């Protein structure tokens, strides 16, 4: 049985890494740092450590797991972090700025994109968290130390785990 193993409920067969359309993946060799960098086309690039996030306004969201159970995540709203870095929000979010977006980058190279319009309170008003706790405890192993949680997404693919960088991109200057 050494030629077989299970990964996230999928049987992987040695020598066939794309068995059933799933590529075999491994965890990164080193853990993600306990900080997040906010950079890009902004006036105040910054790095937030776990203690910085703990001192910011916090929210909690509930997300259903695949088995139907609910998981509670706690963290800082993404829009609050972007605001602290000088990303246009509120009344500044008009005209050319609406062609801007944020790339969320994970420690393992995974990336997703959010438009400023979907984050903005006057537009999509999505409740996206940079979470550091799950069910009241720090995120474990491959989950953290920080991750994005998008409770209104139908699929969890944009809930980036091992979050390291938020990069603001302004298409029209």
Image (spheres, helix red, strand yellow):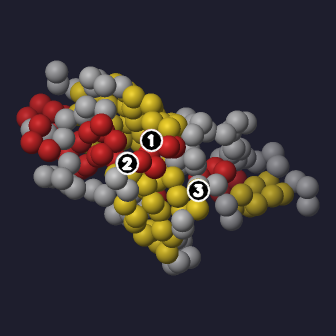
> Is disc 1 surrounded by few (<14), some (14 to 19) or many (20+) residues within 10 Å?
few
> Is disc 3 surrounded by few (<14), some (14 to 19) or many (20+) residues within 10 Å?
some
The quarter of the picture where the C terminus appears is top left
Q: Which residue is mark 3?
A: 138
The quarter of the picture where the N terminus appears is bottom right
How far apart, in angstroms, are the residues tagged by discs 2 and 3?
16 Å
Q: Nearer the viewer, residue 58 or 65?
A: 58
Dot placed on the residue nearer the N-terminal end, 3 or 1: 1
Judge from the rendering whether residue 94 lies leftward or rightward of residue 166; answer left or right: left
Q: Residue at x 26, y 39 (%)?
A: 83
Q: Which residue is mark 2?
A: 56
Q: Residue at x 57, y 47 (%)?
A: 145
Vertical relation: 76 (above or below) 61: above
Q: Which residue is mark 1?
A: 52
How far apart, in angstroms, are the residues tagged by discs 3 and 1?
15 Å
How far apart, in angstroms, are the residues tagged by discs 2 and 1?
7 Å
* Quarter occupied by residue 98: top left
Foreground mark, 2 or 3? 2
Dot placed on the residue nearer the N-terminal end, 2 or 3: 2
Q: Residue at x 50, y 43 (%)?
A: 51
Contact between labelled residues 1 and 2, with CB atoms less than 8 Å apart: yes
Disc 2 on helix, strand or loop?
A: loop
């Amino acid at each position: 049985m050494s030629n077989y193993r299970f990964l996230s409920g999928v049987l992987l067969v040695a020598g066939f890494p794309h068995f059933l359309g799933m590529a075999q993946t491994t965890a990164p060799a080193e853990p993600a740092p306990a900080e997040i960098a906010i950079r890009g086309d902004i006036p105040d690039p910054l790095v937030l450590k776990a203690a910085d996030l703990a001192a910011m306004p916090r929210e909690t969201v509930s997300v259903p797991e695949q088995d139907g159970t609910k998981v509670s995540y706690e963290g800082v709203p993404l829009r609050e972090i972007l605001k602290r870095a000088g990303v246009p929000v509120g009344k500044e979010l008009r005209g050319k700025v609406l062609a801007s977006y944020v790339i969320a980058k994970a420690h393992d190279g995974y990336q997703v994109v959010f438009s400023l319009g979907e984050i903005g309170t006057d537009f999509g008003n999505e409740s996206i968290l940079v979470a550091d706790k799950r069910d009241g405890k720090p995120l474990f192993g491959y989950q953290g130390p920080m991750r994005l949680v998008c409770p209104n997404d139908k699929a969890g693919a944009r809930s980036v785990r091992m979050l390291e960088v938020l990069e603001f991109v302004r298409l029209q200057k």
